[in-house]
Image (cartoon, rainbow, N blue to C red):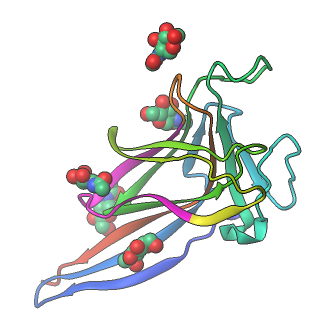
Amino acid sequence: MRSFLWLTFLLLNLTQNTLCILINVTVDDNDHSILYSPAGAWNARNAASSCPACTAQPDPTKMVSGTWHDSTFYPIDEGTHDIPNINTPRFANLTFNGSAVYVFCALAESVKSPDGNSDMAFYVDGQLMGHFFRPALGNDNIYEYQFPVFSNNSLAPGEHTLVLQNGRVNGTQSLVLLDYIVYTYVLIDTPA
Ligand SMILES: *[C@@H]1O[C@H](CO)[C@@H](O)[C@H](O)[C@H]1NC(C)=O
Ligand SMILES: *[C@@H]1O[C@H](CO)[C@@H](O)[C@H](O)[C@H]1NC(C)=O
Ligand SMILES: *[C@@H]1O[C@H](CO)[C@@H](O)[C@H](O)[C@H]1NC(C)=O
Ligand SMILES: *[C@@H]1O[C@H](CO)[C@@H](O)[C@H](O)[C@H]1NC(C)=O
Ligand SMILES: *[C@@H]1O[C@H](CO)[C@@H](O)[C@H](O)[C@H]1NC(C)=O
């Protein structure tokens, strides 16, 4: 499936010497530049692949390009059924060239089937830069879409690696429905 790029242009600064243009690039969840791990911990989803094993059933038409990636972190005490990679955080990693990054997820509000609890950590270049913690609000069959779970618009322009970590060792159950990531590419033109 083709990935989609949406470009937004913003003229930041026009002086005699420097033209600096910020370009927003949307990286959809199904773009191959996003690396998901561990193997088998994420389900690539869309309307055509229903994922009967998945408890979260958001509306595909409300997801950017109709796709999302679904993972649940389970702590060790979450029942006895055989869950691969139990108590192991799930990761979505993206290397990008820019000065800002924004992560958008769908959130489930139900407490059960799915358990909509969120426990995410965000690292940029290996440094912890933010968390998104939210207990399930308790509304069955309600999802929030394109919810900004992390942003940073003050990175040094250049190459960075973003890591979304779903769950913590010995933490609580956590659901992630990743829709897309936006980063801001910095185009600097310095005429002679
Ligand atoms: C890029 O997208 C983010 C998130 O939607 C927005 O806050 C920001 O203003 C946008 N930046 C540009 C240069 O369009
Ligand atoms: C993603 O980043 C995490 C944390 O650095 C790392 O443990 C994991 O192996 C990375 N996954 C991939 C596929 O690179
Ligand atoms: C954004 O990144 C900058 C540069 O690494 C850092 O100093 C700042 O604390 C970060 N801000 C947020 C809100 O994460
Ligand atoms: C997780 O819990 C186990 C059992 O209580 C403990 O041995 C281990 O050190 C804990 N790990 C972390 C990272 O908290
Ligand atoms: C990032 O983009 C800037 C602006 O186009 C470019 O000058 C730079 O070489 C790029 N860096 C990497 C690591 O690709």
Magenta-colored stretch includes residue 45:
no
Q: Is residue 165 or residue 74 the one in the foreground?
A: 74
Report the magenta residues as a range: 147-166
Q: Is residue 184 above or below residue 113?
A: below
Q: Is residue 83 above or below residue 179?
A: above
Magenta-colored stretch includes residue 158:
yes
Q: Quadrant of residue 40?
A: top right
Q: Is residue 97 or residue 84 the one in the foreground?
A: 84
Q: Position of residue 72 (x, y in %)?
A: 67, 38
Point out the image quarter for the N terminus: bottom right
Side (left or right) of 152 relative to 110? left
Q: Position of residue 69 (x, y in %)?
A: 67, 50
Q: Quadrant of residue 30?
A: bottom right
- Residue at the (57%, 32%) spot, across then down: 172
- Residue at the (25%, 75%) spot, across then down: 188
Asked whether the viewer can see residue 57, the reply is yes
- Residue at the (52%, 68%) spot, across then down: 26
Side (left or right) of 42 relative to 26? right
Q: Quadrant of residue 121?
A: top left
Q: Is residue 148 above or below residue 11?
A: above
Point out the image quarter for the C terminus: bottom left
Asked whether the viewer can see residue 24, the reply is no
Side (left or right) of 167 relative to 187? right
Q: Position of residue 61 (x, y in %)?
A: 76, 71
Q: Main secondary structure of the magenta part?
A: strand
